[in-house]
Amino acid sequence: MHTRILSIIILFFLIASCSKPSKPTDRMTFVVDSIMNQLTLDEKIGQLNLPSSGDMITGETGSSDIAKKIEKGMVGGLFNIKSVAKIKEVQKIAVEKSRTKIPLIFGMDVIHGYESVFPIPLGLSCSWDMKLIEQSARIAAQEASADGINWTYSPMVDISRDARWGRISEGSGEDPYLGSEIASAMVRGYQGNDLTANNTIMSCVKHYALYGAAESGRDYNTVDMSKHRMYNEYLPPYKAAIDAGAGSIMASFNEIDAVPATANRWLLTDVLRNEWGFKGFVVSDYTGVSEMVNHGYGDLQYVSAKALEAGLDMDMVSEGLLTTLTKSVKEGKISEKQINEACRRILEAKYKLGLFKDPYKYCDDVRAKSEVFTAANRATARSTAAQSFVLLKNEGQILPIKKSSTIALIGPLADSKENMTGTWSVAARFAESISVRDGLQKAVGANVKILYAKGSNLDEDEAIEERATMFGKTLHRDKRSAEEMRNEAIKIAKSADVIVAAVGEAAEMSGEASSRVNIQIPEAQKDLLKALLKTGKPVVLVLFTGRPLILKWESENIPAILNVWFGGSEAGDAIADVLFGDVNPSGKLTTTFPQHVGQLPMYYAQKNTGRPLGNDKWFQKFRSNYLDVSNEPVYPFGFGLSYTNFSYGDIKLSKTEMSAEDSVSVSIDVTNNGSYEGAEVVQLYIRDLVGSVTRPVKELKGFQKINLKAGETKHVSFMILNKTLSFYRQDLTFGSEPGKFLFMIGGNSRDVKQLEFTLRP
Ligand code: BGC
């Protein structure tokens, strides 16, 4: 800590260290109490204020509006500020110039890596590899903390079953069980087991809650949902993150039960604190407080007071709390006690991070230079990216491609660096990202030339392309006509052995405020694909996307499809690794790929209805189906191919019945029948056949990713406990119900082996 400061904080620390209470929580209370006793009401309210750094840049910091506020003790934290130099300068204002001397907390959206960028979260989830996912968050935390950041707005754990919603790319897909596993892995990765270390950061799980169920997939839209569905399907991942120790949580933009989440006391206090025992702090989303005025919930003073009362502690950007709470206290609308509680939680977070001991602990120039975007981190990002890719089709074993083949690399995403990192990669170094072209060329070496043509623009409509390539993620629009571009592509395609078509969405076609109703590959690129198919050369579709797309035509016409999502800064190298077979793909989808947008929301864990189609063929009158498309997806949840083939033996049970205190083992043999070594994600689903409330036809309850050499067989078993069979019942208590169950195991949610089992009363 800076020696010149004769701050009240130092004083408290001296006192604190002389008469240290023995238990860590007592020590924290002691320190925070000592600080709070010295604060005025306005200074306490100041701690609840979280502006974005905005125009605050080095050189101007001293005179900017925010700097003045920091000096006056009107700011608790800051986000969107990058680099040790800037952060140090701002922290100095807080700890040296303000009366309170309280350090700021520095936040950022470190979502899937920092400068070494990992695949977008939806892609990462397709690895089904919790160690790998935790490691990606660990590396992100290491890099971000080396660059001054101590708080990240991640993980985003919103379950989404509607591919129109652009933010589906930021989460882990449609399943609450898998989503919960990933949520805790991410929190462990960010926070490690010691938040006071200088290479861990505080996690902020978001967006609490149900944000992914926005009506019509339109961002920020209304959500309306039964409690039963909330508890069983949407809330589990938030709870898992809290159970894993997430230090903070972000309220979502949507309303819940007709009250905006930001001021929803049931959500922020009854469930979060009273039921789940959350001890951290709640921050609003960006202008979430003032947006309640638009929701029609009241004026700024009213909604700010309601938010505080509901359990919100920090206001991101609105300054609703900052500008109205004093007045509300004076008018008796809220009590100072409520402000104290919120202020205490913010100070506790700073204490947990060790900021009172050393406000500059994350401001180490040496670390910033040596620990960010390192060769080792980039290598891990590369191997992780390869694990996120999902092989959707490989007819005639076109893949892997021989390095000696003549390859025509075609498509608007083939030579793009800026788009490789996908949405929410605010710290990325675009210029150093590896494009597909770079990656392939490097892999084949200087003696083999990769032929390249752009082939088409992203979209014929320039306005759409502009919206889809914001934040510097340009695709360098080509001014030539579609025909000219296509002809150039066909020409090189004709002289190649194989065509690799790098097409799909641009990075900013998914993510925040990027909802779409037409979730197909844009028409311009589909026309290109059709023209390429006509050459008669084998076509490999390398698909970039941030959401499930409608791939009906592609799945029927294109022989090989590798879904690479947005793989991160090293995407191009990872794509080369998989296309050339140095890595055998093993990713499995974590969201259903529908055949028509009209099927949305779509998910495997559906209810049966009173008139299910059963095994009958579509179409059946007076059955639950459509006139114009079947109920099937194009690719089901859990689906993904490998260069090798896996077969499943018969499912076995250690016993066919058990009581609630007991356990049972369910197992299966999995064999690699092909000629490559490969990894398979073995998935366990259950169905509770009769319940006091209706249960889904399938629910994921376990998975194991196993590695098998060619010809090898492994026995995979899962332990079933009473907990595995439990759910939130109508009264929202968690427990099981005796009766019959189906246990199902397979390599995806559709193709499973099954056995019946009984839970005895
Ligand atoms: C997003 C959050 C994000 C915040 C801060 C909001 O618009 O909804 O996910 O963390 O901005 O950048």
Image (tube, rainbow, N blue to C red):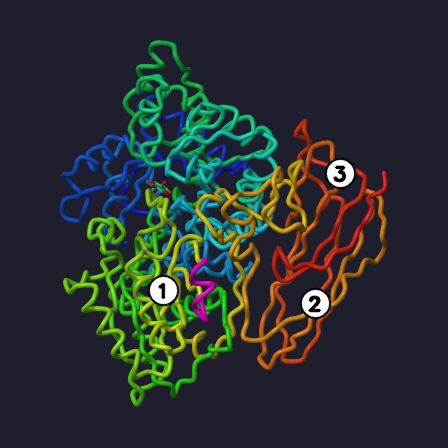
Cβ atoms at labels 3 and 1 below 8 Å apart? no
**Is 556 colored magenta in this rendering?**
yes
Q: CA distance from mark 2 to mark 1?
A: 44 Å
Q: CA distance from mark 3 to mark 1?
A: 55 Å
Amino acid beneath label 1: Glu
Q: Is residue 295 above or below residue 91?
A: above
Q: Given the image, on which type of amino acid does mark 3 rest?
A: Val
Q: Quadrant of residue 371?
A: bottom left
- Location of residue 639 in the rendering, given as x and y in whole percent from the top left corner: 56, 60
Q: Is residue 42 visible?
A: yes
Q: Which residue is mark 2?
A: 648
Q: Residue at x 40, y 52 (%)?
A: 111
Query: Label 1's element?
Result: loop
User: What residue is shown with label 3?
Assistant: 690
Q: Position of residue 540 (x, y in %)?
A: 41, 72
For badge 2, the amino acid type reads Tyr
- Residues rendered magenta in the picture: 552-561
Q: Residues within 10 Å of mark 2 (few under 14, many from 20)?
A: many
Give residue 371's mark: 1
Q: Badge 3: few (under 14), some or many (20 or more) residues near its Cα, within 10 Å?
A: few
Tell whether 374 sits left or right of 690. left
